[in-house]
Amino acid sequence: MEEYKVIIGREYIQDYEDLKLYLDNSSMYESNKNKILNLIDRDLDRLKISPYIGARLDSRILIPNDYRYLVSGDYLQFYKISNNIVKVYRLVYAKSDYLTTLKLL
């Protein structure tokens, strides 16, 4: 089975750090905080073997683009596939204005 190389973008790293900071300052149970981060990490790991598990963003919007997204609980992970490389660009809250975050608007 072919394994893809996953490259994490700088903005994704910042998004992840911001989420961790938000969770650290929330009154949520520690176990729930860990579940959120573990789900995101697990899904990110799945892209190494199955990058096509995420849906094409252009199937949901009329703006042409080559992003795919993976739903990880309440968060979306946006990425692109090129040959055997998966570049993960952003991690955003699913109810946010992700089209502006991705600079598609």
Image: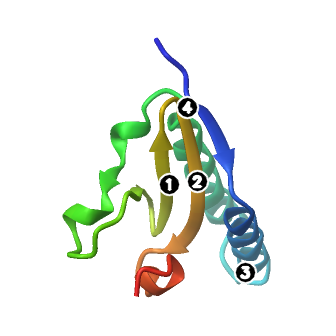
Helix, strand or loop for disc 3:
helix
Residue found at x 63% / y 47%: 41
- Could you tell whether 34 is left or right of 102 in the image? right
Front of the two marks 3 and 2:
2
Q: CA distance from mark 3 to mark 1?
A: 23 Å
Which image quadrant: the C terminus? bottom left
User: Would you say the residues marked 3 and 2 are in contact, meaning their CB atoms lie under 8 Å apart?
Assistant: no
Residue 46 showing in the rendered view: yes
User: Would you say the residues marked 2 and 1 are in contact, meaning their CB atoms lie under 8 Å apart?
Assistant: yes
Q: Amino acid at mark 4?
A: Lys
In the image, residue 55 lies at what x, y percent? Answer: 30, 52
Q: Kindly identify which residue carries mark 4.
A: 48
Residue found at x 47% / y 51%: 80
Q: Amino acid at mark 1?
A: Tyr
Residues packed near mark 2 inside 10 Å, few (<14), some (14 to 19) or many (20 plus): many
Q: Kindly identify which residue carries mark 1.
A: 79
Q: Indicate which disc residue 88 carries.
A: 2
Q: Tell me which numbered mark, 3 or 1, is placed earlier along the sequence.
A: 3
Q: Tell me which numbered mark, 3 or 2, is placed earlier along the sequence.
A: 3
User: Would you say the residues marked 4 and 3 are in contact, meaning their CB atoms lie under 8 Å apart?
Assistant: no
Q: Indicate which disc residue 22 carries.
A: 3
Residues packed near mark 1 inside 10 Å, few (<14), some (14 to 19) or many (20 plus): many
